[in-house]
Image (spheres, rainbow, N blue to C red):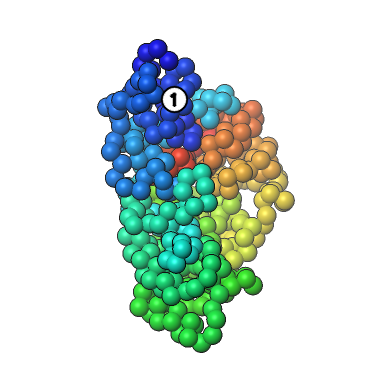
Amino acid sequence: MSQAEPIVRVAAKGDGVTASGRHVALAAPGDLLLPDGTVQWGPHHAAPPCRQFGRCGGCQLQHLDEEALAGFVRDRVLNAAAGQGLEPEAVAPVHLSPPQTRRRASLRAINGGGRPLIGFSEAGSHRVVDMRECHVLAPELFALVEPLRDALASRRGKYALAIELTLADQGVDCAIKGLELDGLQQTEALLDFCREQRLARLMLDQGFGPETFWEPDPVTITLAGVPVDLPAGAFLQATADGEAALVSAAREWLGTGGRLADLFSGLGTFAFALAGANKVLAVEAARDAHLACRTAGRRAGLPVEAVHRDLFRNALRAEELRGFDGVVLDPPRAGAREQVPHLAAAGVPRIVYISCNPSSWARDGRTLADAGYRLAELRPVGQFRWSTHVELASLFVR
């Protein structure tokens, strides 16, 4: 390289990229890649707030300022759309969730040479970066890391634990896989830990599947004002802020007074937000989530009909979907390849597609476009702040 090259964009995995295609780690748009291989910071390069950034795999984009971070989210979504020939008629400003709002996290804990290490895995490896600060987790979740480290300090021998933390209505819901209790003393010590930390629940998997170890009161999560029983491991939007942005889009686009379907409904995040003003059919494959949604809807007296059905193996057919005024779907990362053709054939007037994977969304969007739908609006959402994980809300109209 004989001259400096500007960084023009950020690739999907977080590397800066020059016009000639060179990838540079931790570079932001506007930075200069100098002939000697060093990087001169530009106007969009930010000082990472976390001292562990670059090693911890929890964040990939703390070196971007707000404008560049929003640009990354927007470009990921628009590039996916363009790759399938989708042209949105309107693109909303990017919504970024604030720092310290992540209400669920998957951490690892290992015995690091006589002392516990707890945190995310190091980028590109299985090594655990011992978490000493975190700018994405809700404070209530991060506050449990040090007490967990203390609780594990007396354990001997090697261990590798998977720790799931979720912020529920009653406090922190914690699930630990791989932690075996040996005798009454360890059991009582763990019960004391639950009391002292005021855990909402502790689930343990000692090799025979998850079991409830501690749950003083039934654990719930409030969705659109409706308390819903929270099954262990159930899907939940990563931040309440991001959830509100996605729900707001669905409410705005689907209106009131209609008959709606919420496909891949989970606990009822969208069903409860849309019910009351509409009658909602909520369809979900996970039995525990389906039962929680059905029970909560009945308790609240809302017009939500909850149906247990695997839409990958048994999609709602076109004849079952005719007569609905609108559909909202929020499938897993794989998308809704099996369901979307039936939606298109039914001619549902308005389809709100929520996605955590722009690639599978664009593929399914192409199917809708080929059936005569137009992409009326697209809203990029950066719910996982400083991460390369991107979400979106979209409206297809026929």
Q: Is residue 217 above or below residue 159?
A: below
Is residue 259 visible in this depiction of the protein?
no
Give whichever of 321, 379 is nearer the camera: 379
| Location of residue 387 in the rendering, given as x and y in whole percent from the top left corner | 43, 43
Where the N terminus falls, by quadrant?
top left
Where the C terminus falls, by quadrant?
top right
Q: Is residue 199 above or below residue 386?
A: below
Quadrant in which residue 27 is drawn? top left
Q: Is residue 236 above or below residue 211?
A: above
Is residue 153 visible in this depiction of the protein?
yes
Q: Residue at x 43, y 61 (%)?
A: 117
Q: Residue at x 38, y 64 (%)?
A: 145
User: Badge 1, how many Cα within 10 Å: few under 14, some, many 20+?
Assistant: many
Give whichever of 295, 161 is nearer the camera: 161
Q: Amino acid at mark 1?
A: Val
Q: Residue furthest right?
A: 313
Circle 1 sits on which residue? Answer: 17
| Location of residue 350 in the rendering, given as x and y in whole percent from the top left corner | 54, 39
Q: Residue at x 35, y 61 (%)?
A: 142
Give whichever of 265, 136 is nearer the camera: 136
Q: Residue at x 53, y 36 (%)?
A: 358
Quadrant in which residue 253 is drawn? top left
